[in-house]
Image (cartoon, helix red, strand yellow):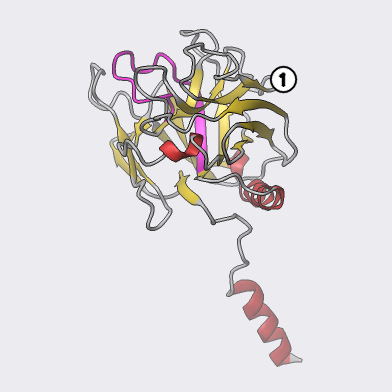
Amino acid sequence: MKSYLSLLLFLVFVIPAKSEITTKGLVVDLNANEGLVLEEDKVVKWSNQVENSSIKDFVVQNKGRGKLNSGAPTLRESVSSINGNNSLVFKRQELVNHQEDELDHLITGSGYTWITILSVYEQIVQLKDVNSFFGNLKNGGKYEGLWGNVTDNNTVWIGSRNSFTMGRWDVNNPMVLAHIPLQKERFYLIAGRMGSGQGIVQIELFINRPTKNVSKDFPVNTNANSSKLVIGQERDTIQHPGKESFDGEMARFLLYDRPLSNDELKKTISELKLIYTIN
């Protein structure tokens, strides 16, 4: 009996449980507990935790800013509402990955899934209803790419842009809009998924659960050319930094270069909700 109990304790306390977070196709994993470089109170680099990914570091963008590192978020440590995990506080600030062409395929046929642990503050109204928490829109032309946003009243909306037309929200640039606003200063799990293939695919929005909140059609353009991935902003915009950025916190950001299956999405969401105690 003693040896059996010893073995049981070993299995429980020594051998870690298998994570249910899907890793196939995972190209970015930004975790506020790891991979941070700080200068005073500013996070000037946030490193991707996916080994062998071509997407490495997200760094402060000082071009266009009047003060050094004013565009960098700050670290909030041991946040009790997310089980003692850290978060990064963004106030119209951004971290940029300068790999220009690594993620073009996400909107030209491969599809994608992204998941974030996010909290929003009161938004500073600048460009109406465009307060981006991430994006890789092309910096010019017809601004193709993918992005995640909240409106001025903190209702989540997401989408992709295919460069067929210039409209902010139209059939080629859908606004996949949630039904109700987020509560301020409360963490949510938010996810977006776009189907793979050519022709018309679906973009789906998920909030706190693996059943979609809302979805819209998206016409794929195989010639679209998106740009650098930016956290806290819709693109690497040095002409008016912070104008289309959000105010809030991010504890985790995962990006896959494929649409996760329903089962994979369910397991991954369940695991992240346990890690961050999301109700």
Q: Is residue 244 magenta?
A: yes
Q: Is residue 139 magenta?
A: no
Q: Amino acid at mark 1?
A: Ile
Please name whichever residue, 221 or 117, is drawn nearer the observer in this view of the structure.
221
Query: Residue 30 occupies which quadrant of the picture?
Result: top left
Question: Circle 1: is it few (<14), some (14-19), or many (20+) Cα within 10 Å?
Answer: few
Image location of residue 53, percent across then percent down: 38, 52
Q: Is 74 on the left or on the right of 60, as rendered?
A: right
For residue 90, side relative to residue 261 (left or right): left
Q: Which residue is mark 1?
A: 180
Residue at point 66% right, 52% down? 264
- Quadrant in the picture for the C terminus: top right
Magenta stretch secondary structure, dominant = loop
Tally of marks: 1
Q: Quadrant of residue 5?
A: bottom right
Rendering coords of residue 20 (x, y %): 63, 58
Determine the secondary structure under disc 1: loop
Q: Which residues are magenta?
A: 231-254
